[in-house]
Structures are given as structure tokens and as C-alpha cells.
Amino acid sequence: MEIAVLGLNHRSAPVELRERVAFQEEKLPAALAAVRRELDLPECVILSTCNRVELYTVLPERDGHESKLKSFLTQFHRLEPESLNKGLYWHLQPDSVRHLFRVAAGLDSMVVGESEILGQVRDAYASAVNHGSVGSVFHRLFQTALRAGKEARSRTRIGQGAVSIGSVGVELARRIFRDLSSKTILVLGAGQIAKSTLTCLKAQGIQKILVANRTLETAVPLAESVGGRVVPFADLEASVTQADIVICSTSADRWLLTRAQIQAIMSARRQRPLFLIDISVPRNLDPRIGQLENVYLYDIDDLEGIASSNLQMRLSEIEACSEIVEREMNGFLAKINGHGSA
Amino acid sequence: MIFSHAFIIFASYVAFALALLTGVLFLVQESRLKRKDPRVLDARTVPLELLDRINLYAVVAGFTLFSAGMLAGSRLARLEWGSYFSGDPKELWSLITWAAYAGVLALRLSRGLRGRRVVFLSVMSFALLAFTFLGVNYLTSTRHPFI
């Protein structure tokens, strides 16, 4: 018996290839059934996310299965056989087990330590269980992997600290405001980072979203996509007075808001705290605004600075995290080997 | 009666101590946010808005209790010592402390101020309170042996 993994990820293959090999959710049952019947492999889990596609299988012996599984992939996705020559990796024990544990711990992720992958591994396992592709080996393997992934995150700081502009914005907002869901957010401009920051904040339950843009054609679709309301760009001060968080990502060639304007706005809002995120380059909010009391102004460099220092912190945890993975892996291998000989 | 006076005053000290604690936490976190210190994102931080709110409520509670305690004290003084106010250092410094917290509340409630400066004043007022509580007993001669 041999646990094997065939796959590709964000490091081994470009996105054009990854998206062609990805398994849509509705095709998963057919794929699992095909592996079971056509390849005669009773245990199989398919992990398919935007950054990786991996087929975990239990083989009766070490040799002779790599090419079969590769041709299964190409046939299932109707690809040219040679298109997968580069980009695929193939691991047998113990590397296959180590690989899964590292994936679950977030060590193999594009953003080290991100937590989404643990849920994706859990979903992949659950879906294989539902379709009858998991036996005693994979029950034990995936449960151990999920536990190791959880332990790696709780025992080390691999998953801590916001590492993207949007999540740093959210974390800062949570240090200022008590209850984000009752706050109002104003978006000036419609840049990509503004959108992703807005999405992160919206995930915190923010209901009231105001969108202002110089051109109405850009503002309307953005407002519709996030369930917000378009407000006139000309009357910026009135909108800022209502808002608690302002995301600014315009391409104006002057300050959109000056210190004096914000000062007036602050007394109109009776000094309720105001969080301003200026991700425009060049900056569109007068940096002297940040000197005002109860006003917190962060520009793109501030946010990136925090994100990168958090990423450094996560990177420094890789070693400790790997130790947990190795320990769990050795424990698992010892168990199944003992089980096999018994 | 002397116990209710002492008890109410002591309860006000507890409320003011809570205002001090939240005030200091507010000032540290506020300054980290302003300086863009990454430590602001440490796991165990309470939102500024909440610290500010607790600070306000604690000052309101402390001030109410302190006022009631002083009233009880002055009535007690009238009965025991013959006059409502006799210029005892404890009484004098209590009045100063009371005025300081009254100022903090006036700024907060009537002028709508909030944030760093008023929180700072509430923290500073606690220094006066600490002197009224302890300093007076050590440095002056007072007819208040304990509180």
C-alpha cells in the first residue's frame, strides 16, 4: 500500500494550466467514480482550489501508476497529453503525506499560513467521503492532516497577522470601531485595491456603503455589485460627514480633502472617529489630516508596511510549523505501518 | 452613617480606577494607531471606541458616587464636627478632585469632546484622586483617618 499524490500548484504551473485542470464541483463525483472504476483505486480525494489541483490516492504498490493517473487527468479534462508534461508533481510516501500536511498547515500556500486552505482540505475530504471514495487509510490520513493543520496554526503564529492591504484595513478598523456592522463606509474612486478592501470590510457585516466617483458610469456598477448607494462626487463633505470609514483610490491631481475640510467635518460629526484609507498614488488626501484628533489616516505605504512585517513574522514561523508537520507525519506513518504489519 | 459615607466614596474610587485603566489603554492604543506602530494589531486589543465609551461611563459613575459621598460626608461633618465644611485637607482636596472630574465631564458631555485630550484629562484627574486618597493622609494632618 502506498499513499501517492499527483498535482500541480501555483508554483509548478501557470494559472492558464491550473484552470484547465481544475475540477468543477459538479464534476467531482464523476471524477472520483472514474478513478475508482477505471483505475481500480478505491481511495481517492481530489483537492481542487484556484491555486492547486491535487489527486490523492492509495496505490496497491509503488510503481506503475503515475502515467495512468496522468493520462486520466488529460483524458478527463480533454487536454493534449503533452500539455501536462511540465508542471505536475508526483510524490510517494513519505513525501506525499508530508505534502498534504504542509498544504493543510498553509505552508504550501501562496500566502503562507492562510486559513482558507484548511477548509478546502476539509471540504475535499468530506466530498470524497460522500461519494464513497474514502476508506480506512484516507479517513486516518485526512483527519490527522486536518488536526496537524489546526495545531500548526494554534501553536505557532503562521496564520496570524493580516498580510494583504484589505485585511490590514479591516484589522485596523476593528481596533478603532466597536461594531463594524453598524458603520458606514464611503468609497471614492473604483480601483482594484479599493474594491478588494471594500470586499474585506463588507465581509465584516458593514451594511451601509456609499460610492462616489467622478464618472457615474463607473460608480453605478460598483455600487450595484456591493449593494451600495451612489452619492454625488461634488458633495464630498456631506458624504464624509456620514461615513466612518473612507477608502480613497482616485487619480486626482490635487488633494480631494484638506485638513481644514476634515476639521470642519469632525466638528459636524461631533468628533466621532473617522478612519481614512488613502490607497491612491499619488495620494489624494492631505497627509496633515492625520494630525487631527480622532482621525486615523493610513496611506498605501502604511498598509503595505504592516502587511509585509506580518508576512515576515509568518515566514519566521515556518520552521516551528514544519516541525509540527514532521512530528505529525512521523506519528501517522508509524501508525499505518504498525497497522499494516499487524 | 460614617460607613455609608466611606463606602460610597470607596465605590467612586473603584469607578475612577476603571476610568484610569481604560484611559491608559486608550492613550496607548491611540498613540500606536497614530504612529502606525504594527503592535496596534496585537491580538488582545480592545477597540478605541469601546475604551472611550467605558471611560466615559466610568467617569460618570465615579463622579455621581463621589458627589453623593461628599454630600453624605458633609452632612456627617455637620452632625459630628458642627459644620458642613471645615477646611480639612481631605475635604479641600476632595473638592479639587471633584472639580477636575466635573471639568472632564463638562468637556465631554456639553462640548461633545472625545478622544485623546479628554481621556488624558481623566487620567490626570486620577492623580489628584490618588493624592486625595493617600497623599493627604501621609503629608498633611487630617481628621480623616482612612478614606
Image (spheres, grey):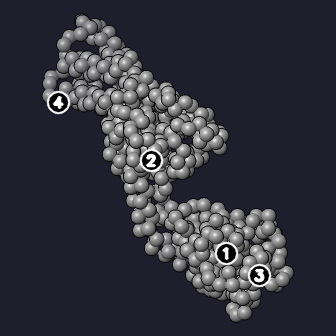
Cα gap from disc 3 to disc 2, whole angstroms: 46 Å
Which x, y percent locates residue A311?
44, 62
The answer to which of B10 and A243 lies nearer the viewer is A243
Q: Nearer the viewer, mark 3 or mark 2?
A: 2
Q: Residue at coordinates 31% horizontally, 30% vertically from top-left?
A: B117
Q: Where does residue B74 sit, x and y in percent of width and height? A: 30, 11
Of all chains, the one bearing label 1 is A
Instruction: Describe the element under mark 4 as helix, strand or loop.
Output: helix
Residue furthest bottom as drawn:
A63
Q: Are marks 4 and 3 in contact (CB under 8 Å)?
A: no
- Which residue bears the numbered disc 3? A72
Measured in 3D between alpha carbons, the distance from the residue under mark 2 to the one under mark 1, in whole angstroms, is 37 Å
Answer with the quarter of the image where residue B47 lies: top left
Where residue A161 sits: x, y (%)? 46, 56
> Which mark's residue is nearer the viewer, 1 or 4?
1
Amino acid carrying label 1: it is Glu
The residue under label 1 is A54
Please tell me which residue lies in front, A297 or B26: A297
Residue type at the position of mark 3: Phe
Q: Chain of mark 3?
A: A
Give the Cα distance between marks 1 and 4.
Answer: 75 Å
**What's under tag 4, amino acid-wise?**
Tyr
Q: Nearer the viewer, residue A138 or A115?
A: A115
Question: In x, y percent, where is residue B83?
Answer: 24, 6
Q: Quadrant of residue A258?
A: top left
Front label number (1 vs 3): 3
**Disc marking residue A26:** none
* Residues at circles 3 and 2 in contact by the CB criterion of under 8 Å: no
Q: Quadrant of residue A317?
A: bottom left
The label nearer to you, 4 versus 2, is 2
Q: Is residue B16 left or right of residue A6?
A: left
